[in-house]
Image (tube, grey):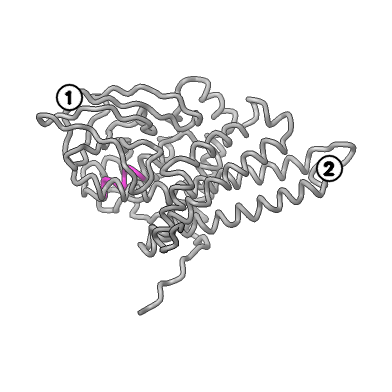
Amino acid sequence: MSAQPEPALLYSEEEAALRAAVRDLLTDHCDPAGVIARTESGAAHDVPLWKALSDSMGLAGLLIPEELGGQGATHREAAVVLEELGRAVAPVPYLTSAVVATEALLACGADDLLAELASATTVAALAVGLHVAPGGAAVRARVEAGALHGELTGIADASFADVLLVPADDGGLYAVPSADVTVVPQTSLDLTRPVARVTLDGVAGRRLGDAGPAVRRALRAGAGLLASEQLGLADWLLTETVRYLKERKQFNRQVGGFQALKHRLARLWLEVAGLRAAARGAADALATGADTDVAVAVAQAYAGQVAVHAAEEALQLHGGIGMTWEHPVHLYLKRAKADSIAYGATGTHREALAELVDLRAP
């Protein structure tokens, strides 16, 4: 029996160049003050930034084959994009449309919709609650007399989507124009990734394929690449906290020079380094198809707690300024908390991992 190749965790030159391009764009168009102002405006999504990412840079079609107008890239490149979006807490539907919905459409072979996503003329969202883990039970719409009925809650970025991909109780996945449904915003801790209640009242939908495998594939990719977003969050928080402690002085001493704080930062650095390995492993497994379920479960069993810990440490170590609305740390804490239950909570992934490696609890 031949051994599986080792996962490639290091970034390639192409991935490094992609990171630099995305970071430059976000530096120019997604500053923290602007994100905070947007959360206060009631318009959570940054439309100009999304157009720049999806249209100008072609990132909406990163996972879509070239023959359909996409980039034909892999999950490794998508992971790099999500790291940078996480670092900026960017309010764009990249994970939900360019990853999760795209994976569902790829599973169904919906070439026309994929071409629309690749050309940045359409945004899609999978109408499954953001909390649902891969393989988890999702609420499905009812099919009555050929029309869809029901109420689906916790749908991320539904308010920005042009098309909703709705799983139904007949086993099908249906494409439904968002203009035909009622979308009502729900209260969300994370103001940069809004969720909504979607009500279908006898709407027509186009059956794309079987919902089961499509939803599972989509949620698995979402969970695996969410770890890269969480890595970006944690890395920014660690970097900014170190920078602040080097500048801040107390009792005529640099705050970062206190040994107790050095120990806390060293521990956090090790956690972020571990998260980087786990996130890169999940992205590589999604790209190659090798031990994908295990790699995704490992990443999500670890990612949530590290991102939340990084945010909590950043908030505390920034002192009084960290508690203010003007400082962006609260955006990262809210995103980290929301991400920790997105696509399955930590405990859910640990249980899945135990099953996968046959280490169930006694």
Binning the other alpha carbons within 10 Å of mark 2 as few (below 14), some (14 to 19) or many (20 upward) gives: some
Residue 19 appearing in the image: yes
Reply above or below: 243 against 269.
Answer: above
Magenta residues? 100-106
* 2 and 1 marks in contact (CB < 8 Å): no
Could you say where residue 306 lies in the image, as x and y percent from the top left?
Answer: 58, 47
Judged from the image, the secondary structure of the residue bearing numbered disc 1 is strand
Along the line of sight, the residue nearer the viewer: 100 or 131: 131
Quick one: label 1, few (<14), some, or many (20+) residues within 10 Å? some
**Up/down of 4 relative to 312, above or below:** below
Quadrant position of residue 249: top right
**Residue 238 colored magenta?**
no
Q: Name the residue that disc number 1 marks.
A: 202
**Percent position (x, y) of residue 52?**
43, 37
Q: Amino acid at mark 2?
A: Gln
How far is mark 2 from mark 1, CA to CA? Answer: 64 Å
